[in-house]
């Protein structure tokens, strides 16, 4: 089956996958765009799972100050090598996370950080986690994917472990 360059580009734009990965996923799915996107998402999650134990000793701290200078954020994103830490795509991802934190105001990076007693008080635990946990929130630039999905996509692209280590959000007059 011939895979047209336009659909490969569309899939790359939608998923952030490399050209050969996108073409291979389209070939595996028989040209079905949605199935190919699912294949790439599953591959990213698989790669991410294999990389979680690898040390992340490099990275960047991305900053964002919202228009009007009333909200500011810092986000620390770690990665295995300084080569990736200096990559423009990685830096852009970190900046987008800083913007996300400014807009979505998460309290925690991961579900494991939420105190058990706080979670126990919630009727709908899943909805609460999606509200207060950065990794479970819909990504501000693509509401169809969570921050965790986008992180796995980056891990799949760079073939390195990436961790969102911590963040801080400050709002003028806030506590």
Image (spheres, rainbow, N blue to C red):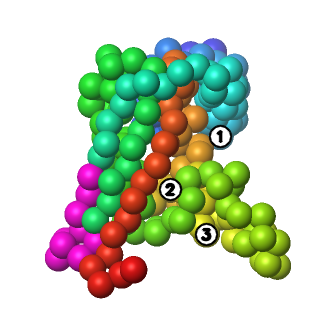
Task: Let me know if residue 16 is in the magenta part.
Answer: no
Q: Residues within 10 Å of mark 1 (few under 14, many from 20)?
A: few
Q: Find residue 133 and report its horizontal and vertical position in percent.
A: 60, 60
Please report contact status of discs 3 and 2: CB closer than 8 Å, yes or no: no
Q: Nearer the viewer, mark 3 or mark 2?
A: 3
| Residue indicated by mark 1 | 34
Please say whether residue 3 is visible from this viewpoint.
Answer: no
The quarter of the rendered structure image containing the N terminus is: top right
Q: Find residue 142 and report its horizontal and vertical position in percent.
A: 48, 55
CA separation, marks 1 and 3?
Answer: 27 Å
Q: Residues within 10 Å of mark 3 (few under 14, many from 20)?
A: some
Asked if residue 139 is positioned above or below residue 51 in the image, the reply reads below
The first of marks 2 and 1 along the sequence is 1
- Identified at 59% across, 43% down, the residue is 149
| Residue indicated by mark 2 | 139
| Residue indicated by mark 3 | 131
Q: Residues within 10 Å of mark 2 (few under 14, many from 20)?
A: many
Task: Let me know if residue 65 is in the magenta part.
Answer: yes
- Over which residues does the magenta segment extend? 63-71
Please say whether residue 139 is visible from this viewpoint.
Answer: yes
Q: Quadrant of residue 138?
A: bottom right
Disc 2 element: strand
Disc 3 element: helix
The quarter of the rendered structure image containing the C terminus is: bottom left
Disc 1 element: helix
Please report contact status of discs 2 and 1: CB closer than 8 Å, yes or no: no
């Amino acid at each position: 089956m011939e895979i047209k360059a336009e659909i490969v580009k569309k899939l790359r734009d939608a998923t952030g996958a490399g050209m050969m990965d996108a073409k291979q996923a389209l070939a595996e799915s028989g040209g079905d765009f949605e199935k190919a996107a699912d294949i790439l998402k599953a591959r990213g999650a698989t790669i991410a799972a294999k990389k979680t134990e690898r040390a992340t000793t490099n990275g960047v701290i991305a900053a964002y100050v919202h228009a009007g200078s009333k909200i500011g954020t810092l986000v620390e994103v770690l990665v295995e090598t300084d080569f990736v830490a200096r990559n423009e795509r990685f830096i852009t991802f970190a900046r987008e996370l800083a913007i996300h934190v400014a807009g979505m105001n998460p309290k925690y990076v991961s579900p494991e950080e939420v105190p058990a007693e706080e979670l126990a008080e919630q009727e709908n635990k899943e909805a609460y986690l999606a509200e207060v946990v950065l990794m479970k929130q819909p990504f501000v630039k693509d509401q169809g994917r969570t921050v965790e999905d986008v992180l796995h996509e980056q891990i799949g692209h760079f073939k390195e472990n990436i961790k969102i280590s911590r963040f801080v959000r400050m709002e003028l007059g806030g506590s």
